[in-house]
C-alpha cells in the first residue's frame, strides 16, 4: 500500500470477520513481540477506546472491510505523510 493512502488516526473501521469496530490511533507500527513485522495500523475497540496493552490490535489496510468515519486531516497531517513517504522511499 502507498503511504499517501494511509487512513488518518481517529478513523473508525470494521475489520473482515470482526464483530467490533476499531479506531485507528497509529500508523506504520512494528510488532516487537516475537517476529518483528510492520503493520499499517494499530487500533483499539470502538467505542471503548484504550483498555490496556492487551486490547491494542495491529492490522493492515487489506484487513479492513468497512470504513465508517475518516479521522481528522489537515496540513500538519499532510506534512507528516509526506515525510513518512520520503522516509520509506529512501
Image (spheres, rainbow, N blue to C red):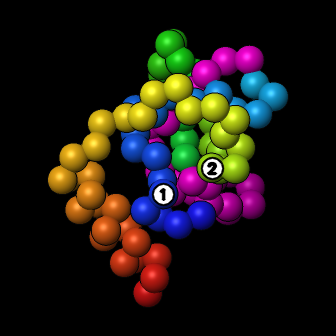
Assess disc 2: are there few (<14), some (14-19) or many (≥20) residues with their C-alpha within 10 Å of its C-alpha. some
Q: Residue at x 30, y 70 (%)?
A: 83
Q: Main secondary structure of the magenta part?
A: strand
**Is residue 34 in the magenta section?**
yes
Q: Position of residue 74 (x, y in %)?
A: 21, 46
Assess disc 1: are there few (<14), some (14-19) or many (≥20) residues with their C-alpha within 10 Å of its C-alpha. few
Quadrant location, the C terminus: bottom left
Quadrant location, the N terminus: bottom right
Q: Position of residue 11 (x, y in %)?
A: 45, 33
Residue indicated by mark 2: 61
Q: Residue at x 40, y 72 (%)?
A: 85
Q: Position of residue 52 (x, y in %)?
A: 53, 23
Q: Nearer the viewer, residue 53 or 24?
A: 24
The mark that comes first in sequence, 2 or 1, is: 1
Q: Position of residue 16 (x, y in %)?
A: 76, 34
| Disc number for residue 5 | 1
Q: Residue at x 23, y 62 (%)?
A: 79
Helix, strand or loop at mark 2: helix
Region rendered in magenta: 19-40
**Is residue 33 in the magenta section?**
yes
In this view of the protein, can residue 37 be seen by the observer? yes
How many numbered marks does the figure carry?
Answer: 2
Q: Nearer the viewer, residue 79 or 30?
A: 79
The alpha-carbon separation of the residues under discs 2 and 1 comes to: 9 Å
Amino acid at each position: 500500500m502507498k503511504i499517501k493512502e494511509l487512513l488518518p488516526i481517529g478513523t473508525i473501521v470494521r475489520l473482515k470477520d470482526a464483530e467490533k469496530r476499531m479506531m485507528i490511533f497509529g500508523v506504520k507500527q512494528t510488532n516487537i513481540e516475537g517476529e518483528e513485522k510492520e503493520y499499517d495500523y494499530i487500533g483499539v475497540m470502538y467505542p471503548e477506546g484504550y483498555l490496556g496493552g492487551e486490547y491494542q490490535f495491529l492490522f493492515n489496510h487489506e484487513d479492513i472491510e468497512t470504513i465508517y468515519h475518516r479521522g481528522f486531516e489537515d496540513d500538519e497531517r499532510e506534512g507528516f505523510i509526506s515525510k513518512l513517504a520520503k522516509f520509506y522511499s529512501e
